[in-house]
Amino acid sequence: MPAAPEPLLDVADMQGNILAGFNKDHQLLVALNIAEVAGTRRWLARVWPQISTLTQVLQFNSLFRSMRAQTGSEPVGLVASWFNIAFSHDAIVKLTSTNEADALPGRAFRAGLSAQRARGLADPVPEGERDPTAKWVVGSAGSAPDIFVIIASDRPTELEALALRVLPNPSQDGVDAPRMVWKELGETLPNLPGHEHFGWKDGVSQPGVRGLVSQNPEVLLTPRILQSAPDGEVEFAHPGQPLVWPGNFVLGYPHTDRNDGKPLGPAPLAFDWFRNGSFLVFRRLNQNVAGFAQFLEQQAASLAKTPGFAGLTPMQLGSLLVGRWPSGAPLSRMPLADDPVLAADRDANNDFLFASDSPLPNFLPGHSVASFPLAFEATKGPLCPHAAHIFKVNPRDHTTDVGPDFDTLTRRILRRGSPFGPPLISPLGGDDGVERGLHFLCYQASIEDQFEFLQKRWANTELGPTPGGHDIIIGQTKSMERTMEVPAIVRGQQPEVVTTPTQWVTPTGGGYFFAPSVSAIRDRFASGLPNEHGG
Amino acid sequence: MKVTNFNPPGNNTDLAGSATLQQKWSDKLSGYFTSGEDRLNNLLAAGSTRQFYNPLTRGSTAPDVAGSAGLITWNGFPRKFLSSTPGTAPNFEDAEPATLGVARPQDEYLEWFVRKSGDKITSVEFTCEGWDYYDFLAVEASAVLVQIYRTFIDPTVQLTELMSGNRYNRFNKWNTERGALHLTERANNLFAEVILAAEATVRRKNSSGAEVVAAGPLTTCSGFGDHLRNSDPAIGAAVNKLARQGRMVTLADPVGLYIDRLDLDSFSLPGNVPLTDWFRVLRGTATHTLRAVFAPPAGSSQTVSDVMIDEEPILFGGQIAQHITMKIVGVASVSTTVNNPLVACIGPILLSAAAVGAEPELPTRGGQ
């Protein structure tokens, strides 16, 4: 049966961070509140032409990759600065209508990241409070921001210059322009680029989004280097990168059938301007780096006394909790030692499954793979704990409590976060009292089916997607206590259970937003003219 | 694992007064396991080792894997009522008809019944008891059967209302339009659970000779259930994975399908009052729950309709079922020495139940 044709993506109309990702070393997040609708429209009318589109980001990323491939190193002097924007439900009510805001698909977006929603996520409640969001620095209940701005650049000076140009200011936009209520800079860690504060490589695994970026059927959003999969199997663009239909991330396109992976829809939209938009989740997650390091130190020493864990190091225990070594090399391929060379090889570092042994990738002609140990989860496993972070949020081919691997495709999110705060150089020396963590950002077509599902149903529970314990890295429970079963590192020995009453990742801000198309911002949000094509 | 007898599901005390009845139930369960073993004789290649065993007749004291290796869980809400369209709620309404004489379409080994007073939901009762246990009671202990109905459904239930001629009618009014004492869906029975576990130990290959391991294709290839459910692929794939690791597998006593837990994190009452005692085990135990109810605790003036889930009011029992995790408990040997040759797929239709002989009247998950 011939493969279903992939849809042409409206790359000039989509905001660029959604499907391409800014991938910048410096990323400023800004929360704004609408003072007056008129001033907000005036500001939007001024800045919408500066919104970075998918076309622009793709072209830059392509040029960057091309130069890096040619020179073998990061291109020097190639700089881009990007600007994207998203709106809360309340903001859309103000700028369009209640009818339109309520017609956007999904209950979570309508509700917003309220106190109750945060309780549902099991966000911890500060002592003496009843509301988990009470002490958030941004997005606490009753003061959720209306507008969320992302400004990113390769250089801090360029970022500042762009921020000056695009953020509201009374001299250009009037005194009733939106008011800044919070801003914070996220930056790649200078000592560990691409890693999060605990020291592990982040963002290795992202889904491949189907779709064409031009009329030329050869030009795909996600390039393919693998042969097509037989009917009934998940198809991959790249080793470890499954293909998902774009409607799972952007409104107005075919989405993935949770039963067989085939395209469905697109789902009808109540208003034309919804097309090319995506829902954005922001979570400001503080990381207790010293506490995590101390836990690993103590727990590894304790486990090392048991028969299955002789010689266990703190880094190895941390890698069992994450599912990868700090370099990003997966435990499923390297169960006993890190391998930075494998970790740096994009064809190898994400190529593994959890239910099956992983065969050599079936490359298209012209591609080959370096020789690394393959993953043998099925016959030699478990090598990666079922409660390891990377398993909990993406169980790959492993069947789950809600169905097969095709269902898992519909849970995937596009992560666009970056660290904030300075690195803690000597974690075992104790905390320095400085805030640090992750600006978690992700795009999806349904907040409740994707982000909330992953957090609530899998990370926060002992039994989802399959039994083995909580995600000790990001999982949350009301009691804070979380347990995780860790398979022995000595073959043939019994697993042990790790328990902790401490959460090292704590939400301190957040919000649910909708990132509309550029045309929607221009024609509906900035102009205020009713949509003539509304349903 | 080795057992000396099989206990009733959830270690319930229905048969506590009669050693004869206890023995009959144990014998029945043992027959299920022996049927599973017999099926493997027909499925496996010559010279293979059966990796599924009857722990009563062939049990061993060799060590089993600790931890969660044999624990298999799935969501209790029927997958077929989910939408693939992002942000679209499941079809809760179609998932819970209560029609006389018709099986509920709730096929994840969890069925429920919604009780209302006017337009307010007063309780939602959940059951996960296989109907073959009640067939057994009807034949062997009809007084016990009636007493269970009177305890959990209505004190006026009469035996004649439960029977159709001299056979137990699982679609009787007290188990369909007036309540849910046990599972009604055709394949929701303990025999199906045992046979599914047995057949899932068979390692399969596709027409190209490659081993079939993905849950959906394995379910279809092996013919042991519906690949569109949560439960069958989860059970089949988990057992098959243990078999691929070379382990010996069986089901833990008491054999049954169980409600593991209701996750209340997303539930709320006005004023953020905790939902203490809203979900109560009615039959079985906390770890082997056969029957539970979601209802206001004694003395409360509230109703289920006052509860919100993710800030949405409860209109259907299925909204609660979506937060229920089901389980079966398997047991797998530490030893990983078995390495059987692969067996070709048999396609989507299971070997006919009649071919088995031991329990010809009971459908398995694939035989519907």
Image (cartoon, coloured by chain):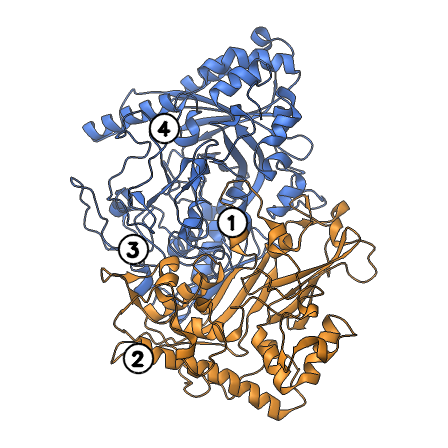
In the rendered picture, chain A carries what hue?
Answer: blue
**In whole angstroms, how far apart are the C-alphas of marks 3 and 2?**
32 Å
**Left or right side of B256 for B271:** right
Looking at the rendered structure, whether the residues under marks 4 and 3 are on a common chain is answered as: yes
Amino acid type at circle 4 is Leu
- Which one is nearer the viewer's eye here, A16 or A253? A253
**In this rendering, is residue A165 above or below B219?**
above
Q: Residue at x 56, y 89 (%)?
A: B24
Chain colored orange: B
Name the residue type under label 1: Gly
* Amino acid type shown at disc 3: Met
Q: Please, what secondary structure does the residue beneath circle 3 have? A: loop
B27 in relation to B368, above or below: below
Question: Which residue is at the front of the view, B335 or A495?
Answer: B335
Pointer 2 chain: B
Q: Judge left or right: residue B296 versus residue B345.
A: right
Instruction: Give how far across and how far down residue A163 sits, in percent.
Output: 48, 17
- Tell me, for residue A8, which label it has, or none: 4
Residue A67 screen position, x and y as percent? 23, 25
Q: Farthest residue toward the top?
A: A171
Q: Earlier in the sequence, mark 3 or mark 1?
A: 1
Name the residue carrying label 3. Answer: A334
The residue at which mark 2 appears reads as B49
Of circles 2 and 4, which is in front?
4
Which residue lies at the image location 57% right of the left edge and 19% below the top edge?
A531
Is residue A304 visible from the viewing direction of this image? no
Instruction: Report whether mark 3 lies on the same chain as mark 1.
Output: yes
Per the model, the C-alpha gap separating discs 1 and 4 is: 48 Å
- Between the residue at mark 2 and the residue at mark 4, the CA separation in whole angstroms equals 53 Å
Q: Secondary structure at mark 4?
A: loop
Label 1: which residue? A291
Q: CA distance from mark 1 to mark 2?
A: 50 Å
